[in-house]
Image (tube, rainbow, N blue to C red):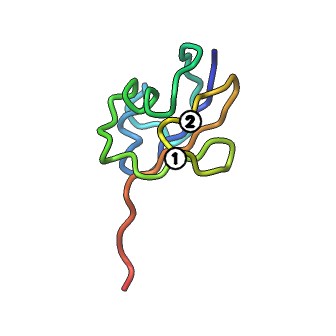
């Protein structure tokens, strides 16, 4: 099945083209989880801090569905 992935900030380097700032389609197997996707993209677990699926925050055990739109963010710091 095909999903659409967008990696943000320092995670862009894990995109198939190595620096994608755009969403990219990705084929995954049925019953793949968000955690499986992170592993498939070789993103260390501690670097994938916040994940959104179709605009909603989800946990790594979320089971992906055809045409899901996933955004993965690294830890965010700063402010005072």
Quarter of the figure with residue 14:
top left
- For the C terminus, give its image quadrant: bottom left
Mark 2 lies on a secondary structure that is loop
Across and down, in percent, residue 34 comes to: 50, 33
Marks 1, 2: nearer the viewer: 2
* 9 lies left or right of 70: left
Residue 17 circle label: none
Across and down, in percent, residue 77 comes to: 35, 69
- Label 2: how many Cα within 10 Å (few below 14, some 14–19, many 20+): some
- For the N terminus, give its image quadrant: top right
Across and down, in percent, residue 45 comes to: 32, 41
* 54 lies left or right of 48: right
Report the residue at 37% width, 58% height from top: 75
Number of numbered labels in the structure image:
2
- Label 1: how many Cα within 10 Å (few below 14, some 14–19, many 20+): many
Report the residue at 42% width, 27% height from top: 17
Report the residue at 58% width, 29% height from top: 63
* Nearer the observer, 21 or 55: 55
Q: Which of marks 1 and 2 is nearer the N terminus?
A: 1
Residue 62 circle label: 2
Provide the residue designation for mark 1.
51
Report the residue at 38% width, 44% height from top: 11
Q: In this view, does 35 lie above or below 73?
A: above
Mark 1 lies on a secondary structure that is strand
Q: Are marks 1 and 2 in contact (CB under 8 Å)?
A: yes
**Separation of disc 1 and disc 2 at Cα?**
10 Å
* Nearer the observer, 57 or 17: 57
Across and down, in percent, residue 55 comes to: 67, 49
């Amino acid at each position: 099945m095909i999903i659409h992935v967008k990696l943000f900030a320092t995670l862009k380097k894990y995109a198939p083209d190595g620096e994608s700032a755009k969403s990219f389609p990705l084929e995954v197997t049925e019953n793949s989880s968000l955690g499986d996707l992170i592993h498939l993209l070789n993103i260390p677990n501690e670097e994938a801090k916040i994940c959104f699926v179709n605009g909603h925050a989800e946990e790594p055990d979320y089971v992906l569905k055809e045409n899901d739109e996933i955004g993965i963010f690294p830890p965010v710091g700063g402010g005072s």
